[in-house]
Amino acid sequence: MDDSFASPGIDAPSPTLSARLRELADYLGAPTAGRLTEEQRALSLGIARRLVADVAAWLHRDIDADALWRDWLRGGLPGAERLAATCFARGEEHRWREQTMLRGAAPSLVAEPEGGPGEDPAAIADKPLSDIERAYLALRIADRRRFDGLGNPCLAIADLDGELFHALLLDVAAWRLVQGGKDDALAAELRDAVRTSFARHGAERGIDGAAQAYHDILAASAALPETAATAIARQDWPTLVALAAAAHRRRYGDMALALLTAEAATLPSLLAPLRIDRAALAPLEASLAMLSGRAIAGGFAGEGPE
């Protein structure tokens, strides 16, 4: 994974966002506690569970992910503070996108073809994809990997920050070693598995790489502002988040959380690198305003926890 995407996190988080992240870290460490809504808890915990299972599968085929999760759920997840922001960002983004889907504004899977209104659809379908269309399709495929087979939100291994992934590998390996009675041969096998998995992760290209490639080809063709404005008009939030993240050289999850916690007045400056007209932001502002329980600088947006 490209280290240039390493992010220090959300800049100057609002007090309510900081409180939410502390809450989620506490909840992941002790799942009976917390003031998050039931939906937020369920989403974040499900995302964490799927992530732990995926990391375990990467590390060693014989690890019982269900037993691992039960143990961690009883005793608290190790490194809950590391997981909190990542799981919360993915969960909040999913809530936002689900709201859009329920309102019937789901984006199409591939870019619109360039044929005229009188052109035969079959002829359009036979046309080879342009470089921009291929880059967009790669972005959509990377985004699809952030869902499991049942459509539940998850975190793709390729999208994880290297430090977080390495820490999870070590935590899972430590659990497996204890289960195996601290056998020397098993310890050596797990050390090798951690090294191999971490090296494999470094070669993976996730949504951040796809977002940067799409952003760069749009910028080179001077199509970036129009494409970003069209994404807002269609409420294609994954594309907007990806382009904004690439423009700021931030991770997708960080950018999603930055948008979700931003007040309307700060959106123009946050999206300034995309050079979108101020008037074109109206659908984005309206969509964010409708999402209940958002942690913004002034408090919780909509009907959220007190």
Image (cartoon, rainbow, N blue to C red):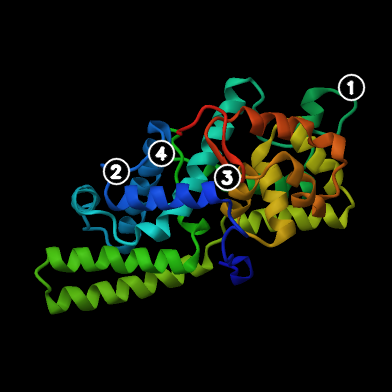
In the drawing, does residue 284 fall left or right of residue 69?
right
Q: Residue at x 13, y 63 (%)?
A: 179
In the drawing, does residue 297 fall left or right of residue 219?
left
Q: Residue at x 56, y 66 (%)?
A: 1
Q: For the residue labelled by badge 2, is the local secondary structure a helix, a strand or a loop? A: loop
The residue that label 1 is drawn on is 117
Contact, mark 4 vs mark 1 (Cβ under 8 Å): no
- How far from the left and from the top, in percent, is residue 46? 36, 41
Task: Give how far apart the Cα atoms at labels 1 and 2 are.
Answer: 57 Å
Q: Residue at x 86, y 34 (%)?
A: 279
Task: Give how far apart the Cα atoms at labels 4 and 2 are.
Answer: 9 Å
Q: For the residue labelled by badge 1, is the local secondary structure a helix, a strand or a loop? A: loop
N-term mark: 3 or 1: 1
N-term mark: 4 or 3: 4
In the drawing, does residue 131 fall left or right of residue 117?
left
Q: Which image quarter: residue 59? A: bottom left
Task: Look at discs 2 and 3 and give the one toward the viewer.
Answer: 2
The residue that label 2 is drawn on is 33
The residue that label 4 is drawn on is 36
Q: Is residue 207 above or below residue 281?
A: below
Task: Give how far apart the Cα atoms at labels 3 and 1 are.
Answer: 30 Å
Q: Residue furthest left?
A: 181
Disc 4 residue crowd, few under 14, some 14–19, many 20+, Cα 10 Å: some
Disc 3 residue crowd, few under 14, some 14–19, many 20+, Cα 10 Å: many
N-term mark: 2 or 3: 2
The amino acid sitting under disc 4 is Leu
The amino acid sitting under disc 1 is Pro
Contact, mark 4 vs mark 3 (Cβ under 8 Å): no
Q: Is residue 121 above or below residue 63?
A: above
Task: Give how far apart the Cα atoms at labels 4 and 3 are.
Answer: 26 Å
Q: Which image quarter: residue 233? A: top right
The residue that label 3 is drawn on is 143
